Image: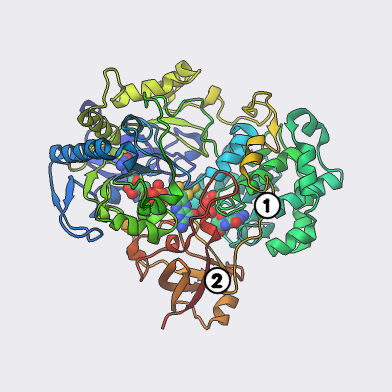
Amino acid sequence: MSERLPAAGEHVPGVCPLDCPDACSLDVTVSEGRVTAVGGSHVNPVTEGYICSKVRRYPEVVHGERRVRFPRLRVGKKGEGKFRQIGWDEALDLVARKMREIRDAHGGEAILPVSYGGSNGYVSQDTTDTRLFWRLKASRLARNVCAAPSGAAATGMTGKMTGVAMQDYVHAKLVVMWGVNPPASGIHILPYVQEAVRRGAKLVVVDPRRTKLAEKADLHLAVRPGTDLPVALSIIRWLFESGKADREFLAKHTTGAEELERRASVWTFARAAAEARVSEADLERFARMYADARPAVMRCGWGLERNVNGGSAVAAVLALPAVAGKFGVRGGGYTMSNSKAFDIDALAAVSATEPSTRLVNMNLVGETLLARENPIRLLFVYNCNALQTLPAQAKVRRGLEREDLFTVVFDPVLTDTALYADVVLPATTFLEREEMSRGYGAIALQRGRPAIPPVGESRPNHEVFAELCRRTGVAQPGDPETAEAIVATLLGSSRERDALVRALETKGVAHPNGVAAPVQFVDAFPKTPDRRMRLVPEDLEKEASAGLYAYRSVPGTSEFPLALVSPSNDKMISSSLGELYDEQFPVEISPSDAVARGIADGDTVRVWNGQGEVRCKAHVSDALTPGVASLSKGLWSHHTLSGTSANTLAPDTLTDVGAGACFNDARVQVERAR
Ligand SMILES: Nc1nc2c(c(=O)[nH]1)N[C@H]1C(S)=C(S)[C@@H](COP(=O)(O)OP(=O)(O)OC[C@H]3O[C@@H](n4cnc5c(=O)[nH]c(N)nc54)[C@H](O)[C@@H]3O)O[C@H]1N2
Ligand SMILES: Nc1nc2c(c(=O)[nH]1)N[C@H]1C(S)=C(S)[C@@H](COP(=O)(O)OP(=O)(O)OC[C@H]3O[C@@H](n4cnc5c(=O)[nH]c(N)nc54)[C@H](O)[C@@H]3O)O[C@H]1N2
Ligand SMILES: [Mo]
């Protein structure tokens, strides 16, 4: 690895594997072993030479105060964050010994790995880590905290057909941004949307908040959280009833159209408008705009999936372009997740057999840690700040406090979760290790190389887990362990291996089948056996207890009348980079909700429900619709007065399909703090 390290002052190419759709190609400046600047390059076409202000600050994470530089052993109480430095040998021996002892005495299921989106890279997740936990026959984790309902819908309907590339948005006459907030969550689509608008396209935004994008929209539907399903179904109904449905396309390229039509038929604009608290006229206007525009493109985000109707809502939204006949032209169709745009088997380098052990839904980690039966005795957290990102935070915290739980946290940063660890292991950041990464928005595959040597004694994920395989005695000869071997194995799982290797070597970026911007139903088809889009997929139908597209009225009581959404903010990526911000984050409420409660802008308030409370400042903003409040996701304990966050108020109930998180089903009351 060291022979690749650049000289001082040099610019090195890189890729950002953080959890964002864009997967930017980077230009990293280094000096004397330190990263001094991170900027964008042109290798990934959509990066266009610029990156977000968040990752521009990444050098402060790499060399920051909260950086974990050596292994630590807990000396204080759990949560206190008192540790002493230990050596890697001691740390790994201790962790491996605990793993073996617990497995031998209680079975592997007493071990629970918890990981998520700290690095979306192919090398640092689902390689040697998963090998270790599978071979130990540990409990398995269903990574359902994000994209589970939308993933289930997209998989059931199209096998995750590749979506419209950002670059092609310029061709659209209508752009619909549905439950997505790219000014915060993925900025590189914005210039293309702006260019489309400059060329005369209309813009529709569906979001309970008046986001910056919604301010510029021709139509902003400020739907009540959790009501996208009736909204989409009412448009589908109208398309069928008014003769605007593309019956030829439906007959040729889909199954289930009649059933969808039947299920949508009850959703008049009046009924949907009443549920969503928008005007009937606006719904009809949206339907007409959508029917008449060609090409029309829809960016379906993740805001609409995080509620009890989430899976059906995404399915109904993805069905719209099929019903309205929007596919088959450049700039027409939809974008959801492009995470399966490449046919790389993300598990190819695990090289182990998946055991049929207990499967723990990530949203129920708190519950699971507190369960008395078959208890978890060893928790291994990596690529994740579980305390700050999982629902039912109070339960997660109580679980982490258990004295009889041995917790390992492996992270580059001393997160709030790490404060509860028995052993903290220092991980390299992506600027200090090998990586291969693909976007889930941008349709691009890139290699990342270390720009600087590991900071302190930090080590990359794949090395540490390979070492733990050895020390627990589960390593086998021939296991792919080095980044090179892992990358080769992953690429080898693709049918177009040679082309990908060549493109990565010559251009630094590869696109599936060499196409950077495929057209849906021309270059990219549903990956179903008959290449048809299933509008009422059987598996989803079976999974949804009341059937797919069955609407459950959203929660809310007189006691807790406000819907609390917790969207991404433009400073952090989930909780990543949160250590760089000392300031408090406010709960945002509408002027009328503030007046009704005697709350003024800047007041300290208590936001609470049956699960707990958050004390923070209030920001009174007319960007919020009455009845809706907003508190950013990913906050750390130092970001609120109470040390709790929206996750304390978020329930650990699950979505209709996909068993995903229902963060935005949080219902709360707000009052001025006395
Ligand atoms: N209230 C609320 N909460 C939410 C959501 C919401 O809408 N509302 N949304 C959720 C969503 S969409 C998601 S995806 C989840 C994300 O939840 P998490 O996956 O917990 O995301 P992060 O907070 O970014 O934490 C990632 C951690 O990985 C670490 N990391 C980075 N690189 C590496 C590496 O190479 N090795 C190791 N070992 N660690 C690394 C980072 O330092 C960071 O601490 O949060 C969810 N939480
Ligand atoms: N800066 C930054 N970028 C990020 C992230 C981050 O935390 N910070 N997180 C990354 C991750 S893990 C993900 S998954 C993506 C998510 O990216 P997005 O899809 O943009 O997701 P969110 O920010 O959760 O929510 C988007 C919008 O949905 C709205 N919303 C909430 N509830 C509903 C609803 O019921 N219906 C509708 N129509 N809209 C609703 C919110 O008000 C918000 O404006 O972004 C990624 N990029
Ligand atoms: Mo996410």
Q: Earlier in the sequence, mark 2 or mark 1?
A: 1
Quarter of the image for the C terminus: give it.
bottom left
Q: Which residue, as the protein is rendered here, is positioned at the far top?
A: 498
Name the image quarter holding residue 410.
top left
State which mark lies toward you, 2 or 1: 2
Name the amino acid type tagged 2. Phe
Disc 1 crowd, CA 10 A, few/some/many (<14, 14-19, 20+) = many
Residue at the image point whose x is 78% and y is 34% from the top: 250
Up the image or down, 330 lies above or below 188; here it is: above
Name the amino acid type tagged 1. Leu
The CA distance from mark 2 to mark 1 is: 23 Å
Quarter of the image for the N terminus: give it.
top left
Whether residue 325 sits left or right of residue 7 in the image: it is right
Name the image quarter holding residue 613.
bottom left
Up the image or down, 579 lies above or below 176; here it is: below
Q: Which mark is residue 560?
A: 2
Tell which of 234 and 612 is nearer to you.
612
Tell which of 337 and 291 is nearer to you.
337
Element class at badge 2: loop
Residue at the image point whose x is 20% and y is 31% from the top: 471
**Residue 416 seen in render:** no
Name the image quarter holding residue 475.
top left
Tell which of 165 and 193 is nearer to you.
165
Residue of label 1: 229
**Residue 170 seen in render:** yes
> Residue 251 location, x and y as percent?
80, 31
> Residue 594 location, x and y as percent?
54, 78
